[in-house]
Image (cartoon, rainbow, N blue to C red):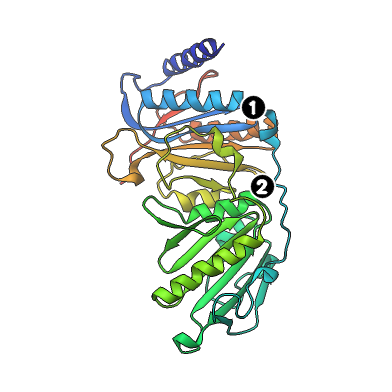
Amino acid sequence: MKCKTRCSFQLGMILFCGLLLISCGEEHGNWTAVQQEGTYIYGVWHSNTLKRVELVMQEVYENITSASPALATAQDIGQTNISPELLLPGDGEILDWVQSRRPSTYEGKTLYRDRAEAPDLFYAYGFQRQAEVEYQTPRFGSKPLILLEIFDMGTPENAFGIYNFHIYPQVKFEWVGSKAILSGGYLRFSKGKYFIQIEGYEFATGIREAMVLLAKNIAAQIKEPASESPMLTLLPSNKMSGSVKLFRSNWALRQIYSTLPVNVPELSDTAIGVSARYRDNPDLKNWMEAQIVFIIRFPDAAAAASAYTLYRDSVMEAALPLEVGTTGPILVNEPLTP
């Protein structure tokens, strides 16, 4: 059965290539491939060769068609449902660190309304409510040195998405009951539907240790395992470390990848996507040049078909050097970005 499926897929690729105005012999390039299967749209961006496109598209197709039907309608049902302010460790729970002021909260569209920080990224991942407080200790002069923020993102997938937004290859991690990112004076992790961000105002061993202890205290109160989207099982294996992303809007997608083609599938309000980078060859040194494989899940097959049709039409209107057939994926040899 698998052989029959693979042969059918390859035949679709061959038939489609016959419609390209550019020659299929032009193997190397900057290839985009996009296809629909049921409730999913999937594809590749920035692939160097058509051969690699074919292999990746086949693997994703097989993963999608062999996946449990429940995956397409999976809902995030969390066990821990505590207001973020109730997860903030109190005075003396972390050595001699105490809260330097009363906790404050933001909810809905009020996030960061009284400061210069932009809340757009949090809104793009379904922000619900935030609580924050600063901590100090007599050992460092009794002044605020740590800012702890806890975000209720509504679902584990949303929390996982904003957490992974901050991950990149070679980033440092710390185990706190979940895998926490340590980067640029921040410690960040997600667990259940919560995203936690801890900022140290100064670089010192005692401050870093307190940040880790705060993280462990919070993680222990959240009963779910470390957040992760079940859609990740549909991506090909051999992902580049630190490259997995989750997105819920085209705005977030373009914040993650600055070199995407002009035309990409349009996500609906209820769609969700995952992506990761893969090396075209083992000698690739710049991870930002690695190809991107993506999968977008829509609420139903009709919504996916509509988004696929809109994407196909936008490619045609752009007068790119191809014709779109009825079999096989849409293939585009994109212009190289400067």
Which amino acid is tagged 1? Gly
Left or right? Give the position of 153 relative to 49. right
Q: Position of residue 101 (x, y in %)?
A: 61, 84
Total of numbered circles in the picture? 2
Along the viewing direction, whichever of 136 and 108 lies nearer the viewer: 136
Alpha-carbon distance for marks 1 and 2?
A: 18 Å
Residue 329 in the image: above or below residue 285: above
Residue named by callout 1: 38
- SS assignment at label 2: loop
- The quarter of the picture where residue 312 lies is top right
- SS assignment at label 1: loop
Using the rendered image of the protein, determine whether residue 337 is visible from the camera's viewpoint.
no
Q: Position of residue 240 (x, y in %)?
A: 40, 41
Residue named by callout 2: 269
Name the residue: 42% across, 40% down: 277
Left or right? Give the position of 298 relative to 189. right
Residue 162 in the image: above or below residue 5: below
Using the rendered image of the protein, determine whether residue 97 is visible from the camera's viewpoint.
yes
Residue 127 in the image: above or below residue 336: below
In the picture, which quadrant includes the N terminus? top right
Name the residue: 62% across, 64% down: 151
- The quarter of the picture where residue 272 lies is top right
Which amino acid is tagged 2? Asp
Q: Are marks 1 and 2 in contact (CB under 8 Å)?
A: no
Q: Position of residue 208 (x, y in %)?
A: 44, 71
